[in-house]
Amino acid sequence: MKTTLFLLATMLAYQAPVSAEEIQTKEVFITKGVLNVEVIHNGKKIKIQRNQDRDNKIDSLYQRTTQGKVQPMHPFAPHEVETIGELELLDYLQQQGNDKSILVVDSRTASWVKRGTIPGSINIPFTAFKDEDDAVEIMEKHFNVFQGAALNFSEAKTLVMFCNGNWCPQSPIAIRKLLALGYPAAKIKYYRGGMQSWHSLGLTVIAP
């Protein structure tokens, strides 16, 4: 046993050092074996990938730690709205290119969106859901909800909603309004990390 440990320690000690040049040129992957993900944004193909500059820093807009109030991980109880992370969001972004029953929604107001959004998303600000008639009109126009004697959600789209981060209430407010109107919780996904988590990973941001 001692001999084995000695040999292992010797091998580690004599490993060739990694040069600064090798570190700088090494690709930054999203996850193992995945360098980028292709999505459709406004009819154009966009590649989402992490910033390859190893000296890149998070956008100054998201550096302050005193913004907002932290949202719960599952802020919609008793409704079982699923909270998702970046990999799940990327999967939905890819799926919606061929599956029109999925829609990724940036719930932030215009002043935030103009600074950049996630490729593949559309902007419907949370304030648009404040008035019930306006909310129903949005659901009919964008979410495949039909209005008759009552709202028909049988063909409603799966919504993936986000805002600025886990301190931002904008998408939770929009989601609560949709739930109050009867939108199925199983068809709503909440990307809690939002733009702050997206920026922290150096993922592609696009101007609207």
Image (tube, rainbow, N blue to C red):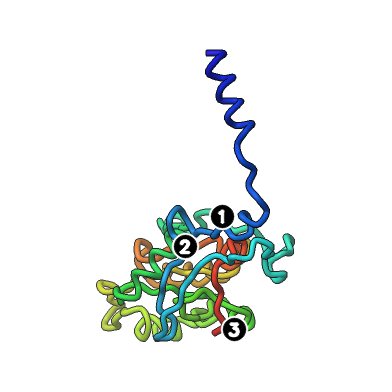
The residue drawn where x is 59% and y is 58% is 71
Cα gap from disc 2 to disc 1, whole angstroms? 31 Å
Residue identified by numbered label 2: 35
- Identify the mark at residue 110; answer none if there is no mark: 3
Q: Amino acid at mark 3?
A: Ala
Q: Is residue 153 above or below residue 25?
A: below
Q: Amino acid at mark 2?
A: Leu
Would you call the spot at circle 3 few (<14 residues within 10 Å), some (14-19), or many (20 or more)? few
Would you call the spot at circle 2 few (<14 residues within 10 Å), some (14-19), or many (20 or more)? some
Of 176 and 6, the residue lying toward us: 6
Position in image of residue 82 (x %, y %): 42, 57
The residue drawn where x is 60% and y is 25% is 9
Residue identified by numbered label 1: 72
Give left or right: position of 55 versus 71. right
Q: Amino acid at mark 1?
A: Pro
**Mark earlier in primary sequence (2, 3):** 2
Cα gap from disc 2 to disc 3, whole angstroms? 30 Å
- Secondary structure at badge 2 equals loop
**Quarter of the figure with the C terminus:** bottom right
Would you call the spot at circle 1 few (<14 residues within 10 Å), some (14-19), or many (20 or more)? few
Q: Nearer the viewer, mark 2 or mark 1?
A: 2
